[in-house]
Each structure stands twice: as structure tokens, then as C-alpha cells.
Amino acid sequence: MHTAGGTGEGEAGSEDRTPKKKFSEVQKERREQAQRTVLIHCPNKISEKKFLKYLSQHGPISHHFFYESFGLYAVVEFCQKESVTSLQNVTRTPSMGTEAAIPFKSRFFNLKLKNPSSQTSEKSSIPCSNHSPPSSKKLSELLCYAESVDDQLNTLLKEFQLTEEDIKLRYLTCSLIEDLAAAYFQDCTVRPFGSSVNSFGKLGCDLDMFLDLDEIGKLNTSKTSGNFLMEFQVKNVPSERIATQKILSVIGECLDHFGPGCVGVQKILNARCPLVRFSHQASGFQCDLTTNNRIALKSSELLYMYGALDSRVRALVFSIRCWARAHSLTSSIPGSWITNFSLTMMVIFFLQRRSPPILPTLDYLKTLADAEDKCIIEGHNCTFIRDLNRIKPSGNTETLESLLKEFFEYFGNFAFNKNSINIRQGREQNKPECSPLHIQNPFETSLNISKNVNQSQLQKFVDLARESAWILSQEDKDRPSPSSNQPWGLAMLLQPSVVSSVSLAKKKRRKPASERIKNLLESIKSHSPENDTDTNGK
Ligand code: CTP
Ligand code: MG
């Protein structure tokens, strides 16, 4: 789908001209593929040929691959959905000895050898697809051997972006969860969103899932003729939020009790956006299942569009995400850090601010929308053009190297105390509230997507951005030859030690020891009256 990496030239003129698919078309196609796919835990010693022959009894196979994750797994995509049913019909529920099995006819199987010794002789090593990101050592080597900074950014993108197999496994996992949820809500849909589908996901990123119940009972009322209107009898609860909590609560129980391979199920129902978090053992994905946040699905579509509009966008976002991770600006644990989603918004905003702009504003994309694009969710206008091919490419020809440097300079000097980042209008706005970092949610415009970020995390981001801009500008002057095996360009920016030692040196430069001691004494003095009161009070 994405021809990432590109030509390495980073020129807008080098965009390929093949028609680009709409987000909804990609989702539909992948979902349909996933529905005729099964996941099989295989014995380690297996003949690929015999395995495929055995499964082909149920119908032709259109695609398959193996991967390792605490054992060998196969993802097998049949040409027809009926083949899955045929396979399920010859599959038995295991007898467990002292334990008991809860029967559940899923599309997740365990393959056993009837006669293990017969296959071992033919054992040939099965080619496994890999879905883990490169080690920092390997990445550093790859970057050192690149020919230019532009080449480095494109290399990083190629190494970290989701592979075709990883994407297939993500859609399959959603589809398997959908089968479980369908036990309660027939006709529901579980859709992936967030970085799994917005084209900015790094290998190993979490899998955000959206349980879509909207299709249920949404028959075309216009079709029913006559004077009557039929409605389902339903249970009413006081609010939408309570309905969401109740739904997720039963789904959470269901995953916990009956979901093959679903472990560590946590129901986080009091969050702003209630969710069920679990780990899908066989795929290795950490999953967040939500419902009733259709707007997040729309932001995923918007990001997908931005990612597809110009080949420089994804390369820049991936590098900034990796840079932030390398310096612990982002974390897998929730907290006061900047998130990847916020960083992506910052890059998009920055690219809207270039002259000429590399990306259009959301308001502009709204003006291009036609009647079919119209979309209002919970009173929020989420309309924008969805056909990528109708958006004119940018005439901006800046290189990735220059954009990377400018990004750090731009945000190293941004008036975060006064201004808000806003991709809808593509220009700074006065901050409506006093959070240190304000990035407007593009659709729910009263929300700040980086409300969690505290002043010290923002300061850390600003300091690192300034230092990275400085390193890149120094580098221009004396760059080691690519063959010298010395980290340079992007590789240099990803090295935690370099930036922090520069930062330490700079701090020392800024404040001599005597001044620091003076400050310390002053801060003790300013606290002493309070301490006195405390002591007196006791
Ligand atoms: N989201 C949002 N507002 C937030 C946080 C998240 O609208 N304050 C939506 C975004 O659409 C985001 C999705 O929820 O893409 C998933 O959130 P998250 O997993 O935090 O971000 P990802 O974009 O998936 O990035 P990551 O790779 O870090 O998971
Ligand atoms: Mg995510």
C-alpha cells in the first residue's frame, strides 16, 4: 500500500502518480481479507508443503505466512470464507485431562501432529516473517552507511514501518475479537484505528480497536413502507457513558473468560474514554478496545490522508517519533509525557507552516469536500475531502534534511506559553487555557490532546529540539565521511549520550557552580519561615 522509503530524494516532484486508495476502501478490503483468514499455532517441526496441502482440502489458499512468538504461528488466508467454516467443521475441542475446556469455535486453532516422527525427517527451516523493529545497534549501522540525511530518514522509515504481514495480523486480530463480541452483539464490527491504520505506526505499536455497534438495528427506515415504524425494545440507561461502560464491561468479561489467547484483561472504565486493555498472546499485540469514540476513527483517517499526500510526511514523523523515544520524551507508560499522536500533530502543523506549505490545512480539506464526504459526529463537524487524488500536490521542494533541522528550530523557539497548535487553521492561535502544551483536537475543538503534558516535559522537549538543531547545524560544517563508521546526521541525534552530554555541558555553561549554590541557599531561605511554623506548631 505504501511505497515507503521512496527514492530517497525527498522531492515533492518525485511523488508517484498511481491513484491512491481511500481510507474506507483500504479498511473494507483488509477487513474482508481478515474474515477469510485463520490463525494456527503449529508444532515447531512441520513441513510447510504438507501443511499447505492439508489445509487446501478446505479450499484454495490465497496467501500465508509464518511468524514466531513463543512458538510457531501460521496466518492462512483462504480465497473463500466457506473454507474457514469447512475447517471449523473438522476441528475438535481438546480434552484437557484434569482441566476443563470451554468450548468455543473460533478461527484460532492448534495444529497437532498425529505422528510426530514422520515429519521431523523432512524438517526444513520455515521462513518466518519478522515483526519486531531493528535493534538500536542495527539501526545505527544502517544510518551510518546511508548516503545523506535524506537517505537516513527514508531508511529509518523503511525499517520501522509496519510490514504487510504485520498489518494483516492486526486486521486478523480485530476480526477474531469481533467474533467474540458478536456473541453479544450480532452484526457488530471491530475496527482497528490509531497508528495501526493511520500509516504512522511503528513495528511493535499497540493495537487500538473500536467496537462499532452502529450498524446494529440501523435498518433503512426509509425502506419500510406503510404507516408504522418498528423499533427494538431495549434497556435504557441514564447516559451514553454508562451505556459504553456496561458494554465494555461485558466484553471485558467475555474476553477474560472465553477469549482464546486473550490475557491480562483490564477494564479501565472510568477513563475519559473507557476502554478494555488486554494482551493478545498469539499475535503479541497489546490491545486497547474502546467503543463510542467514532471521532478517533475519523482522526485516523485524517492522519492517513496527511501521510499519503507527500512522501516526506511519514519519513519526518517516524524520525521525530524515534528521536523522542530515544530521549525518553515519550514512554509506553501513560503519564505527563508527550504522546506520539501529539508529535504527529506537531509535524503536520509545521509542514502546514512551510512556504509554500507542504500540507493543506484541515479547513481547506473541508472546502474541497463534496456532499458524500459530509460527516457530523455527536454534533462535531468532521467533514473533509476523502478522495486523495483530488488534492493538488505541494510545490515545495525542501529536502528532508532541511525540514528536520527547521522542525527543531521551529519548535525550539515556539511561543508555547502563548500559542496553541491548530491543524484546522494551520496557524498559531491564542491558547484558550493554561496547559503548558496546547494542541487542539481537530474535530472536538474544545479539547486539548496534550493536556497531560507538564511544564518540565515540555521544557525537556524544547531543550532537546534546540540542541538537535544545533548539532545538525554544526554537522553541516564537518561531517565525517559515511564510510568512517562514526555516527553522523540522524544517527547522532538518536544517541542519548550525545545530546544529554551536550545538554549537561550547556547547563554547566549557563550556571556556574557558585551561582547554583547561591540559588540553593536562597531556596532554603525562602522555605525556612514555613519550616519554623511547622516546628513551632508541634
Ligand atoms: N486520540 C485522540 N485524543 C487523544 C489521544 C488519542 O483523539 N488525546 C485518538 C487518536 O486518533 C489516536 C488514537 O486515539 O491516533 C489512538 O491513541 P494512541 O494509541 O495514544 O496513539 P496512536 O496514534 O495509536 O500512537 P501509538 O503508536 O503511540 O499508539
Ligand atoms: Mg495506538
Image (cartoon, rainbow, N blue to C red):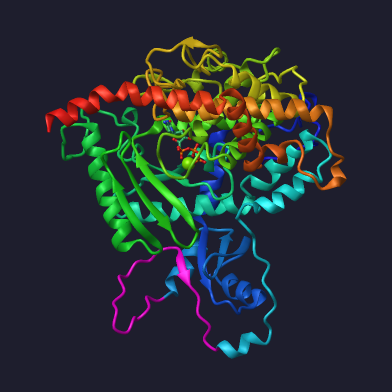
Q: Is 98 a magenta residue?
A: yes
Q: Is residue 239 left or right of residue 159?
A: left
Left or right: 518 as drawn, with respect to 4: left
Q: Could you tell me residue 271's position as x and y percent?
A: 30, 37
Q: Is residue 280 left or right of residue 468?
A: left
Q: Quadrant of the C terminus?
A: top left
Q: What secondary structure is the stretch in magenta mostly built from?
A: loop
Residue 372, percent across and down? 50, 22
Q: Is residue 66 above or below residue 323?
A: below
Foreground pick, 419 / 531? 531
Vertical order, 122 against 364 (above or below): below
Q: Residue at x 57, y 71 (%)?
A: 55
User: Depth check: 463 or 226 in front?
Assistant: 463
- Closest to the observer: 141 or 162? 141
Residue 311 position in % (x across, y down): 71, 31
Q: Is residue 387 above or below residue 135?
A: above
Q: Is residue 159 visible?
A: yes
Please give the name of the residue rendered at 57% of the width and 63% of the height, measured from the top-left corner: 76
Snapshot quadrant of residue 506: top right
Q: Which residues are magenta?
A: 92-115
In the image, is residue 110 part of the stretch drawn in magenta? Answer: yes
